[in-house]
Each structure stands twice: as structure tokens, then as C-alpha cells.
Image: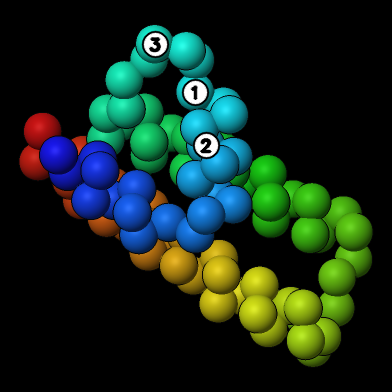
Amino acid sequence: MLVSLILIKLPKDVLIHLTDQKSDGQEWTVKLLREKLHRYITNRENAERQSGIKTDSVYSDSNKCYMSQVRGAMTTTEALGRRQ
């Protein structure tokens, strides 16, 4: 149930990406979700660094907001993971 509460907070394209990365028949757990979100964030940040996106661009400003949403969900999963 906690996982479903976290999943509904994620942006749609992040949810699609995470679902694609999950094996068929594998159930979401807080630990699995945290691992997949961590990998997603790391890969996205590396790609942005390599592509040389300027920090003052309009895309970058909206992307910062988007990534802060994803990081917020990640922080939630980390907190929940510690409780289990």
C-alpha cells in the first residue's frame, strides 16, 4: 500500500520508465522502487551533464522542478525503507 501511495506521486513519464525497468511478475517493494528511482535519477543527471544543457535555459528550469519532484518521491521511499 505504501508503494502505491508513492507511485501516484511520480510524474507519468517516470512511472512509465520505472515500469519498463521492472521484470514481469516482480512486485513493487519500497526497496525495489528506491533502487529504480536512484538509478533513474543518476542516469538522467549523467545524461544532462554529458549533453551540456545550460542551467539558465527554460528547459533546465522546468527540469529542475521535475527532478525535485522525483527526488521528493525518492526521499519518501528512503524514509519508508528505514522503517521496514
Residue at label 2?
Answer: 18
Disc nearest the viewer among 3 and 1: 3
What kind of residue is marked 3?
Gly
The numbered mark at residue 73 is: none
Q: Earlier in the sequence, mark 3 or mark 2?
A: 2
User: Of tags 3 and 2, which is closer to the observer?
Assistant: 3
**Furthest residue toward right:** 51
Q: Position of residue 61 (x, y in %)?
A: 68, 83
SS at badge 3: loop
Label 1 CA crowd tier, 10 Å (few <14, some 14–19, many 20+): some
Q: Of helix, strand and loop, which one carries label 2?
A: helix
Residue type highlighted by circle 1:
Lys
Horizontal arrangement in the rendering, residue 53 relative to residue 44 (left or right) = right
Badge 3 is on which residue?
A: 25
The image quadrant that residue 72 belongs to is bottom left
Q: CA distance from mark 3 to mark 2?
A: 14 Å
Within-10-Å neighbours for mark 3: few <14, some 14–19, many 20+? few
- Report, in whole angstroms, how far the alpha carbon at label 3 lies from the one at label 1: 9 Å
The kind of secondary structure element at disc 1 is loop
Say which quadrant the C terminus sits in.
top left
Residue lying farthest to the top in this orientation: 25
Residue 78 appears anywhere in the view:
no
Q: Which mark is residue 22?
A: 1
In the image: residue 10, left or right of residue 65: left
Q: Are marks 2 and 1 in contact (CB under 8 Å)?
A: yes
**57, above or below 78, in the image:** below
Indicate the amino acid at tag 2: Leu
Q: Residue at x 85, y 70 (%)?
A: 53
Q: Position of residue 12 (x, y in %)?
A: 52, 54
Instruction: Choose top left, top right, bottom left or bottom right for residue 43.
Output: top right
Residue drawn at point x = 90 percent, y = 66 percent: 52
